[in-house]
Amino acid sequence: MNEWRNRRSRRFKSEINVVPYIDVMLVLLIIFMVAAPLISPSIINLPTVGMQANNPAPSAIEIVMRSEGGVLELIDTASKKSLGSLPQPQAIQTIKSQQENLERPVVISADKNVRYEAVVKLLADLNREGVKRVGLSVVKSP
């Protein structure tokens, strides 16, 4: 009779035991915490521009170098007005006359077929004439 009473008093628990799930989650958390520092960062290809290019300052002078020849086109970016197409020495003198205290930024927009040597020579000539703020314009890569 005693057995019959013990059987009746035992009832099935219909609750979910969550302790094993918590143990598994803690083990996974530890694994990810250990593995995270081991992941190496990706290699950055510096010659290409993957981010949005910075727009030139509103009052900058843009120098457009085309692959055809030594004539430079000067554009005032504030008014979007062309200052003329001039040979390099006259273009540099025009830039110097347009700048106040040589602090006005100059942006070089060179065609990708222009020789690197020509761009470096223009940078050196601008530096020699005292132009302090010179930058290169780039196009965002697709």
Image (cartoon, rainbow, N blue to C red):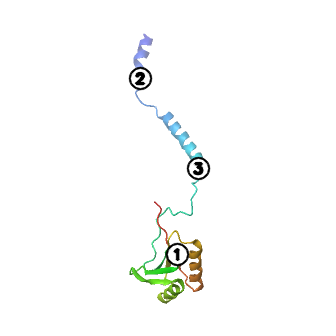
Residue 39, numbered circle: 3
| Residue under the image location 46 percent in, 34 percent down | 18
Task: Identify the disc placed on residue 12.
Answer: 2
Q: Residue at x 41, y 12 (%)?
A: 4
Frontmost residue, 54 versus 140: 140
* Residue 73 appears in the picture as rendered: yes
Q: Which of the two discs, 2 and 1, labels the residue nearer the N terminus?
A: 2
Nearer-N-terminus badge (3/2): 2
Please rate how many residues cluster around mark 1, counting C-alpha atoms within 10 Å: few if below 14, some from 14 to 19, many from 20: some
In this picture, residue 53 sits left or right of residue 42: left
Q: Pointer 3: residues within 10 angstroms few (<14), some, or many (20+)?
A: few
* Of the image marks 3 and 1, the number of the one nearer the N terminus: 3
Q: Amino acid at mark 2?
A: Phe
**Residue at disc 3, secondary structure:** loop
**Numbered tag placed on residue 20 in the rendering:** none
**Observer-nearest residue: 18 or 95?**
95
Instruction: Return the residue at label 1.
Output: 135
The C terminus appears in which quarter of the rendering?
bottom left
Percent coordinates x, y for residue 55 in the rendering: 45, 72
For residue 51, above or below residue 64: above
Q: Is residue 18 above or below residue 73?
A: above
Q: Amino acid at mark 1?
A: Gly
Nearer the observer: mark 3 or 2; the answer is 3
Q: CA distance from mark 3 to mark 1?
A: 36 Å
Q: What amino acid does circle 3 point to? A: Ile
